């Protein structure tokens, strides 16, 4: 039912065990993002709950990814887009837990259209963040990564948030491959190395509607994710993939 439909923007939503809040999150996105039902792709992997069933019941495309990992889920969606007859202009990444403000999606689309930039990142540091929505370790990790980018690339960013929009043709040039939590930093560093036009706008952020965070939910996981992000950053600096 989705094949052949033309979308200017396709929004990829990785989701894992989000049955408690995904219906509310998607309902908000459908009414407030300016996108239509067929513009969304939810990618589920390893969910032990009813996440995919809820998504399908809402008439939204739900893809299954055989291997766990945020990056793997994004790659499955990108491959699906390539093999479908859709040829979007932009790809947007958004979380499934209701943390993002749907109105910010409209803002991201408007700004990338107006500026002609390659990628627009949503910065929570510049926006309104509900108390407790970001853990102290997440705030520290984001600040550290922004400092590293400033140090090595001489470019100032204020957040490493997941809500972002990128030109589809630019995304292709990045040859994304990280299977897990290195995904966002890989996108950022490769785009910097290719001297793409990257900008930030303010976005709001709130606590997830339900369930527990898989990334920042526990200290040990936060540390593991942080190490993975730093490892990905330095690996990309050393083994520069692009000419
Ligand atoms: N497909 C997929 N999605 C995931 C996985 N882990 C987390 N997610 C999704 O990625 C988004 C961000 O994860 P979340 O747990 O909220 O982390 P945090 O907000 O960064 O602390 C949510 O939409 C999750 O459902 C995974 O292994 N596979
Ligand atoms: Mg979250």
Image (tube, rainbow, N blue to C red):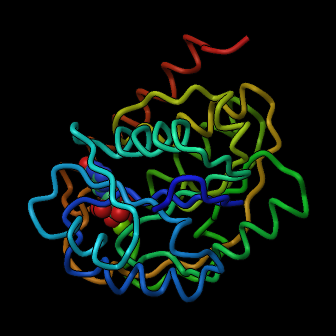
Q: Residue at x 62, y 75 (%)?
A: 35
Q: Reply above or below: 75 against 173.
A: below
- The one nearer the camera, 119 or 219, is 119
Q: Quadrant of residue 195?
A: top right
Q: Is residue 55 left or right of residue 77?
A: left
Q: Quadrant of the N terminus?
A: bottom left
Give the quadrant of ligand 2.
Answer: bottom left
Q: Residue at x 62, y 33 (%)?
A: 189
Q: Residue at x 44, y 82 (%)?
A: 206
Is residue 229 something one can see in this rendering? Answer: yes
Q: Residue at x 11, y 67 (%)?
A: 49
Number of numbered tags placed on the structure image: 0
Q: Position of residue 156 (x, y in %)?
A: 74, 48
Q: Quadrant of the C terminus?
A: top right
Q: Position of residue 132 (x, y in %)?
A: 36, 80
Q: Is residue 74 left or right of residue 120?
A: left
Q: Position of residue 11 (x, y in %)?
A: 54, 61
Q: Quadrant of residue 76?
A: top left
Q: Reply above or below: 43 against 73.
A: below
Is residue 222 something one can see in this rendering? Answer: no
Q: Position of residue 99 (x, y in %)?
A: 43, 76
- As drawn, the residue found furthest toward the left would be 48
Q: Is residue 169 left or right of residue 209?
A: right
């Amino acid at each position: 039912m989705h094949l052949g439909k033309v979308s200017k923007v396709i929004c990829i939503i990785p989701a894992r065990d989000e049955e408690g809040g995904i219906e509310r999150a998607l309902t908000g996105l459908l009414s407030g993002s300016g996108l239509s039902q067929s513009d969304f792709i939810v990618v589920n992997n390893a969910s032990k709950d009813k996440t995919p069933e809820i998504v399908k019941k809402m008439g939204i495309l739900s893809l299954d990814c055989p291997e766990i990992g945020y990056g793997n889920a994004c790659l499955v969606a990108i491959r699906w887009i390539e093999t479908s007859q859709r040829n979007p202009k932009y790809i947007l990444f958004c979380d499934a837990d209701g943390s993002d403000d749907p109105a910010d999606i409209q803002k991201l689309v408007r700004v990338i259209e107006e500026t002609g930039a390659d990628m627009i990142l949503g910065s929570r540091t510049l926006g309104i963040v509900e108390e407790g929505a970001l853990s102290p370790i997440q705030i520290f990790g984001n600040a550290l990564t922004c400092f590293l980018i400033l140090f090595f690339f001489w470019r100032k960013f204020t957040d490493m948030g997941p809500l972002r929009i990128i030109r589809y043709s630019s995304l292709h040039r990045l040859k994304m491959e990280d299977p897990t939590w290195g995904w966002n930093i890989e996108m950022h560093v490769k785009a910097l190395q290719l001297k793409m036009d990257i900008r930030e706008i303010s976005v709001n952020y709130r606590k997830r509607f339900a369930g527990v965070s898989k990334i920042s939910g526990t200290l040990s996981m936060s540390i593991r994710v942080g190490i993975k992000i730093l490892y990905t950053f330095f690996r990309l600096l050393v083994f520069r993939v692009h000419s």
